[in-house]
Amino acid sequence: MIKVVIVGAGQAGALCALNLRRHGFEGEIVLIGDEKHYPYERPPLSKAALLGAGVVPVYVGSKSKFESQTIQLKLNLCALSVSRNEKTIELSNGSQEHYDYLILATGSRPRPFSIQGGELPGIHTLRTLDDANELKRSLDGGGGVLIVGGGWIGLEVAASARSKGLQVTVVEAGSKLCSRALPSELSDYLCAVHQSKGVEIELDTTVSTIDGQDRVEVAALSSGRRIPVSTVVVGIGAIPNAEIALQSGLIVENGIVIDEYCRTSDASIFAVGDVACQFNAFARRPLRLESWENAQLQAMKVAKTILGMADTAANIPWFWSDQYDLSIQMLGLPGEFDSTVSRGSIQASEFSRIYLKDGKITYVCTVNRPKELAMIKKLMLKGITIEPDKLASVKSISELAA
Ligand SMILES: Cc1cc2nc3c(=O)[nH]c(=O)nc-3n(C[C@H](O)[C@H](O)[C@H](O)COP(=O)(O)OP(=O)(O)OC[C@H]3O[C@@H](n4cnc5c(N)ncnc54)[C@H](O)[C@@H]3O)c2cc1C
């Protein structure tokens, strides 16, 4: 009987297991995770979870689901190393697990924050359910909140904390918020939204030290400003958990390098999700995507590959973020463009901003316009060439997608 071992019981790992069964895999499946929780989704952790009465996990699958699918879920267990010659992995309880196929779905972890005072209680990162519970407790205690890093997680926490009535300051080392994912003008829009809600945004600024007796009390900024804080949230990026892949000799370059079938440099080992770096046909370069959709799609792809039903359909990177009453969605990647089109109203926070190069849409950001984003996706997938004026003037994008 063929045995698939999956390391990492997060979104991608759990979905690999469930998709294998869904598509008819009859062999043995072992899913190993170092957290104590059943596999859950992370996006709510920086959004709704911080606002309600308690953090309610959104599970990828229930206990009974894994049992009924005869997926052996081994939690609280860490995979320490891979022996590729023997096709075994060594586990933290001293045991070994043999595999025919191994899937590495180990995700990523928050980039460490190394400054004086960076270890004080009251300083949080946000990756896991336990992190969210701790952060929520800290926010519920009141006091000033400092967000280090003006990326998505930081801004979502800023919005949640502000919605709880807390005083919030965001410190960003660069000159723009979310600069990797947003063109400059949209970054400015988002900055203005937060400022209008009462969040203080300090750009081109870093945190020099954090001081306090038993926990955080004051943060000193590179501008010389000192702000009283009760909670510090560090969101300065994530590092792929690729160590066991690297130690086993797999190719690792900004994550575990995989081909279009999610195969690593060893044909019996796959990698998926945040830890994997894959050539993206739309972007025409290797990308390590840290997104919910990427975890979904790659998990599906691996299951199909193992079952000999491989599909190599290229996807257009898609990401969403919820902040205040804004549902922000981005499709494609910001980069070169020669024309832009606006639809809707920025003032009313209900708009699409579309970027084109040689008549083809390369990137779109919608705010509170989910249906339009879906229609624009169709245009992008078809690679249709469009007159910007027409794109701006049609009543519905569906007229162009037909
Ligand atoms: C707070 C937060 C908010 C987010 N919001 C959004 C959003 O709005 N939109 C969006 O598109 N994406 C969002 N994301 C990103 C999305 O959640 C991730 O891209 C997705 O979770 C990746 O899934 P994964 O399975 O690759 O990694 P993970 O879900 O991180 O799972 C990896 C698992 O492997 C475990 N593991 C690691 N090493 C080992 C080992 N050696 N042995 C055993 N287990 C191991 C880890 O502990 C973890 O449980 C968010 C992420 C976070 C943290």
Image (spheres, helix red, strand yellow):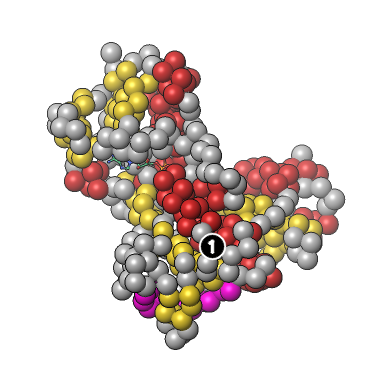
Location of residue 342 (image quadrant): bottom right
Instruction: Please provide the residue range marked out in magenta.
Output: 200-211
In the image, 303 versus 311, the foreground residue is: 303
Residue 116, position as x, y percentages in the image: 31, 73
Residue 158 covered by magenta stretch: no
Disc 1 under 8 Å from ligand 1? The reply is: no
The residue under the point 31% across, 64% down is 119
Residue 204 covered by magenta stretch: yes
Give the vertical position of 83 relative to 236 (above or below): above
| Quadrant (top left/top right/bottom left/bottom right) for the N terminus | top left
Tag 1: amino acid = Gly
- Name the quadrant where ligand 1 sits: top left
| Quadrant (top left/top right/bottom left/bottom right) for the C terminus | top right
Location of residue 163 (image quadrant): bottom right
User: From the viewer's perspective, is 211 left or right of 168?
Assistant: left
For the image shown, how many numbered marks are present on the structure? Answer: 1
Q: Secondary structure at mark 1?
A: loop
Location of residue 192 (image quadrant): bottom right
The residue under the point 65% across, 45% down is 377
Residue 277 shows up from this direction: no
Residue 176, position as x, y percentages in the image: 54, 72
Residue 280, position as x, y percentages in the image: 46, 47
In the image, 360 versus 248, the foreground residue is: 248
Query: Which residue bears the numbered disc 1?
Result: 142
Give the vertical position of 162 relative to 385 (above or below): below
Q: Residues within 10 Å of mark 1 (few under 14, many from 20)?
A: some
